Structure formats: C-alpha cells, structure tokens
C-alpha cells in the first residue's frame, strides 16, 4: 500500500532525465484525456502557473515547478474539483522543505517505527530501486525537495564522504533528481580526527583544509548536493566547544568549505548538553537554545541555517513555540518538526499532527524562518509508515511546507479522499477521527503541558517519575501540594526570552492557555481553572475522557471499510492504543491521587 500514490499508478522508465520529463509522464498516465502543454520558465523556480485556454491547459514553471504543477492538476482533476479556474498560480513559502532521516549504516533507524532503513545495509548504501522510486514520487507529490539520508548522530560516516562510498551516493542522488529532490548528508564534526589530524578545532588550518578537500570531492560526485547537516556539542556529539570556540566559528568553517559549490550548512540547535542536578532549581533546560545562540545573531555565514526544534524541549505532546524561532533576525533559521512519533505514540497510537503544526504556524510570523525540516516517519515496512494512517503526516507536512496557511481539515480531507474509496459519510468520520486524535492522545498522557512522563529511553507508555531525577532537566516537581515549574520572570526567567506580547500572555496563569499551564506555572492542586474545576479534577477528567474517547475511536474505526491489508494493521494497532490509553489513565491518575489525597469528584475508580 503506497497510500495516496495508489490513486495515480504509473509506469516510469528506469532512467529519467529531469523533473520536466517526470511531470510529462505523470500527466500522460494520470490524465491522458487532457490536453496539457508544459512550458519551462526557469525564472519561476519551483513555482508554477496553470492557464486554461479553451480546451487546452498551459502549465508554466521552472523545472521542478512543472512537476509540482502536474501534481496539483492531477489532484484537482482526479477528485472532481469542478472546472479548473482560468488562472492558478502558486509558489512555495519555504525554499528548503527537508526530510531528516535518522538512518544508520547498519540498517537500523533511530526512533524508527516503520521498519529498517530504505537506504543502508551492512555498513553501506544499499537500496531497492523500485522502493526508492516510490519514495521519490511520494516526496514530489507533496513538494518536498531535500532529503538528508543519514542520522544526525553520525556513528560511521566514512562511506558517504570518501572515495569508496561516493559512487553509491551519486547513484542514489540520480534516483531522486528527476523528482526534484536533492540529497543532503549528516557529518560528524570531529571527522578529521579519523584521518590523521589530531584536532577538530575549526580555526586550525589542517582542519579547514580537510573539510575543503572533502567538500570538493563530494561535490565532484554529487554536484547538486544540498549541503551538510550537523549536530554538535549535544548528547555526546563532538563540537567546537571542545576547543573553546563558538558555534558560529564552528558552523562558519564548514560553511566556507561548502561555499564554492553552493552548498548550505544546516546546524542543528538542540539542547547542547544542558545537563543538571535535579536538586538544582536555577538551571532550566528550555532556556538552553536561546542562551547558546541568541547572542550569536549576525555572526553566522549567509549559507548557514540554524535548525531549531518547534518547542524548547524535545517534540513533546504540548509545548510552546521555541523563543529562538522568534529571535535572531539577522540569522537564517529553519523550523524542525518530528514526523516520527517518538513521544506521540510510536506510530502505534493514532496521532495526526496537522492541528499541532497549525498552532505552531499561528504563533510564528512568516518572516522568521526560511526553511523547514521534519524527522522522517518512514522505513522499509510494506506501507512505508508502519501505521497506514501515519502516512497522512508525511503528506500534510509537505503541503504545509508549501503553504503554511492551508486549513488542516482541508489537507487531511484531501489525503483521505485520495487514499480510500469511502462514502462521503465514512470519509467524514475518518477525517473527524484523525483531526481529533492529537487532542485525544494528549488527554490520556501528560497533563496541561507538563510533558516527560514517559518511560525513559523507550519513550512509549507512562512513567510519571521516569525522568524526574535524571540529568536532562525534564522535571515536573510534583509533591503533595503542587505540580509544575514556575518559568515566569520571577521564577526561572524563561519567559523573558519571548517577545512582550507572548510573555504577557503566558506570565499570568489567568491568561495563560490551560493546555500550557503547567509548562509555565507551578500551581496547587486546588487551583481553580477557568471553567471552575480544580486543577486536580481537570487532570482526572482529561485522563478518563482520553480513555473513553480512545474506546469510541476504536469502535468507529472498526466500522470503516478499510481494504483488508490496511484494516488488519489499523485494528491491531488500535487494540494496542486502547491498552496504552488505559495504562496512561490509570497510572497518571493514581500518581496524582497518591500525592494529593484528593479523590475524583465523580467517584470513578482510581487505584490507591
């Protein structure tokens, strides 16, 4: 099952020369009755324009723009959208629309929930051409244009950068090129030390020369490589801090090596070893990204992009927008999302991400970022994403990367209509279930923005104190009277990193949105919520409601006429989700009952 691509079967030749050729073949196969002329206008880049002239349609665009325009036309015509308007014009909001794979050379995928790697086996690049062709079509069909194929935690990078591995990298790049996709590779910052250089100091002449020679060698093999992705000084990864250098100095050295070839250096702004003792009440992990980078604004080269996670923690179910995305006006920035459901159900629990992304874009002014990236949710499972319904996240990510203003309901509905031949009523049921799934999952997991109540390391299932005494700063500080962290200006001061309008909204618990309440504030269990309920009652109610709504979701999914291959997987995973929801409900409610001593106001069963 290839999700929405099943609606557009096509036989493509083994060798394609360009996105323009691919566009022509896709249109000829999908819409043979339609008279469409393709006119290449390089000045339009990835944008496209459709003009209807009588019975004919002119499709104009740059080379990849023609391909994206072809997919727009195919969707419009296949779904019976009525008469094509006389003029349609569209261009992407972000120039780089990236997928970050966390694939390792041994074929495993870090935080992968859909099987093994599609790119690696036995320490080298090795792939099934037919599957790669389908993957490339999937990316083209939702306008994604950059693919970083290996893990940011680089364990064995040699085969991608040295002579013996470059022919394979060049062949893989050739597989994706006709679909408008350029490759990128993650690199190990300390890699010169694997090759006889005693240091990785970015200001060392030998280090600079090694990276310049390496970049030249790689670009001779893959001239259109998008660039390098780096994770440095984080979770044990090496970086410039080792040598007393700033991240601007480290990034700029690599960027200079890429500059002659037009390559970009994407520098990942993760936590950067913000470790702390749980007894330390001064250090606050969410402040780390801003503290490390904000003062460096304007110091990064023009071909450096800082890739910043959507929230200040780590892809939690609910966390506010990272303030670093709102700052650094003189620095190129990319928003990083996570398609892989590391903290949102492992592609077992149904979790449609578009509503969450809509909230992110609502608070993020368009002029603040120039690129977007997401951690891949695919693997070599037969359906690519493990859970058949998880494919919606890849599809909607691509369309939102093109136009962040699209209504999530519109694109989820589009995916459902493309993927399943359901009646209008059944389509409506599935769309409603998918759009509500994020809120349902949130209800039965960590309450009101507190986060991090997951099983350590694995990150699936409840463990309310699993990270409470660890080194990662992921604390909720629950005791008999209260829960949460005071991040106001009189607390840890985290809120001082926000622009005044957001700081003021979050500073007062009476104006702070309820779903962020325990992220920003420490409150007693007797605190009265906006609807009059106490905080502890709201926690109980959310968890019981989340379990009930999961059971209702299971019943509705059982009645939908999925094709057998999808149905078996969906219902089996739904059974596991129900078990997971029950565990979360019982464990979290019991945890807070044992601390607070306050019973549920509705007399429901909580274990003591």
Image (cartoon, rainbow, N blue to C red):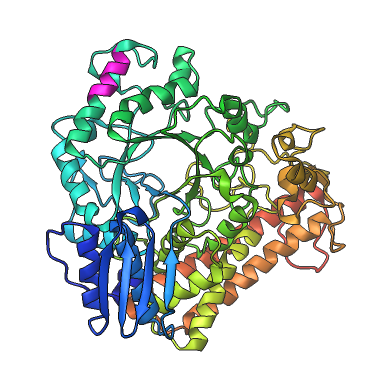
Q: Is residue 263 above or below residue 107?
A: above
Left or right of 545, for residue 50:
left
Which image quarter: residue 586? Answer: bottom right
Q: Position of residue 275 (x, y in %)?
A: 58, 27
Q: Residue at x 43, y 22 (%)?
A: 250
Which image quarter: residue 501? Answer: top right
Q: Which of the pair 356/262 is nearer the observer?
A: 262
Q: Is residue 328 above or below residue 530?
A: above
Left or right of 356, for residue 70:
left
Q: Residue at x 59, y 36 (%)?
A: 329
| Magenta segment | 206-213
Q: Which of the pair 38/575 is nearer the observer?
A: 38
User: Magenta span: helix, strand or loop, mainly?
Assistant: helix
Task: Let me know if residue 225 is in the magenta part.
Answer: no
Q: Which of the pair 13/270 is nearer the observer?
A: 13
Q: Which of the pair 320/346 is nearer the observer?
A: 320
Left or right of 113, for residue 292:
right
């Amino acid at each position: 099952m290839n999700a929405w691509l099943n609606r557009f079967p096509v036989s493509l030749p083994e060798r394609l020369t360009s996105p323009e050729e691919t566009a022509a073949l896709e249109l000829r196969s999908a819409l043979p009755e339609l008279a469409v002329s393709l006119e290449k206008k390089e000045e339009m880049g990835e944008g496209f324009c459709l003009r209807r002239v009588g019975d004919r349609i002119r499709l104009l665009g740059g080379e990849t723009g023609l391909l994206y325009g072809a997919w727009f036309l195919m969707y419009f015509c296949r779904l019976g959208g009525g008469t094509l308007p006389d003029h349609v014009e569209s261009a992407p909001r972000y120039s780089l629309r990236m997928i970050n794979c966390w694939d390792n050379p041994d074929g495993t995928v870090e935080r992968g929930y859909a099987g093994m790697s599609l790119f690696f086996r036995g320490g080298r690049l090795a792939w099934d051409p037919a599957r790669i062709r389908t993957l490339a079509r999937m990316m083209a069909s939702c306008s994604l244009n950059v693919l970083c194929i290996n893990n940011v935690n680089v364990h064995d990078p040699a085969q991608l950068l040295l002579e013996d591995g470059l022919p394979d990298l060049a062949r893989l790049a050739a597989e994706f090129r006709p679909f408008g996709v350029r490759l990128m590779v993650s690199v190990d910052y300390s890699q010169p030390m694997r090759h006889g250089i005693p240091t990785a100091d970015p200001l060392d002449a030998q280090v600079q020369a090694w990276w310049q020679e390496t970049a030249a060698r790689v670009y001779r093999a893959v001239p259109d490589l998008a660039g390098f992705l780096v994770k440095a000084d984080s979770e044990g990864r090496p970086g410039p801090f080792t040598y007393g250098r700033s991240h601007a100095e480290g990034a700029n050295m690599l960027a200079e090596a890429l500059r002659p070839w037009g390559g970009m250096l994407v520098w990942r702004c993760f936590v950067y070893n913000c470790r702390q003792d749980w007894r330390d009440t001064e250090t606050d992990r969410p402040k780390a990204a801003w503290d490390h980078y904000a003062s460096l604004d304007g110091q990064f080269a023009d071909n450096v992009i800082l890739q910043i996670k959507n929230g200040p923690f780590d892809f939690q179910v609910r966390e506010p927008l990272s303030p670093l995305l709102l700052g650094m006006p003189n620095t190129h920035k990319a928003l990083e999302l996570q398609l892989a459901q590391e903290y949102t159900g492992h592609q077992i629990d149904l979790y449609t991400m578009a509503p969450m992304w809509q909230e992110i874009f609502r608070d993020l002014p368009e002029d603040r970022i120039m690129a977007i990236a997401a951690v891949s949710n695919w693997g070599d499972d037969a359906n690519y994403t493990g859970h058949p319904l998880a494919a919606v996240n890849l599809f909607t990510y691509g369309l939102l990367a093109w136009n962040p203003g699209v209504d999530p309901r519109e694109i989820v509905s589009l995916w459902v209509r493309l993927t399943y031949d359901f009646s209008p009523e059944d389509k409506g049921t599935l769309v409603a279930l998918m759009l509500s799934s994020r809120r349902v999952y949130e209800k039965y997991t960590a309450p009101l923005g507190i986060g991090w109540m997951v099983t350590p390391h694995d990150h699936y299932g409840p463990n309310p104190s699993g990270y409470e005494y660890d080194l990662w700063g992921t604390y909720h500080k629950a005791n008999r009277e209260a829960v949460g962290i005071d991040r106001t200006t009189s607390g840890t001061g985290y809120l001082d990193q926000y622009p005044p309008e957001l700081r003021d909204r979050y500073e007062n618990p009476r104006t702070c949105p309820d779903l962020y309440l325990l992220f920003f504030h420490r409150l007693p269990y007797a605190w009265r919520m906006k609807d009059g309920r106490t905080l502890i009652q709201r926690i109980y109610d959310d968890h019981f409601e989340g379990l009930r709504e999961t059971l209702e979701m299971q019943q509705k999914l059982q009645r939908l006429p999925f094709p057998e291959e999808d149905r078996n997987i969906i219902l089996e995973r739904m059974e596991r989700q129900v078990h997971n929801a029950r565990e979360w409900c019982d464990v979290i409610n019991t945890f807070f009952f044992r601390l607070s001593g306050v019973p549920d106001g509705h007399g429901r069963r909580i274990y003591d």
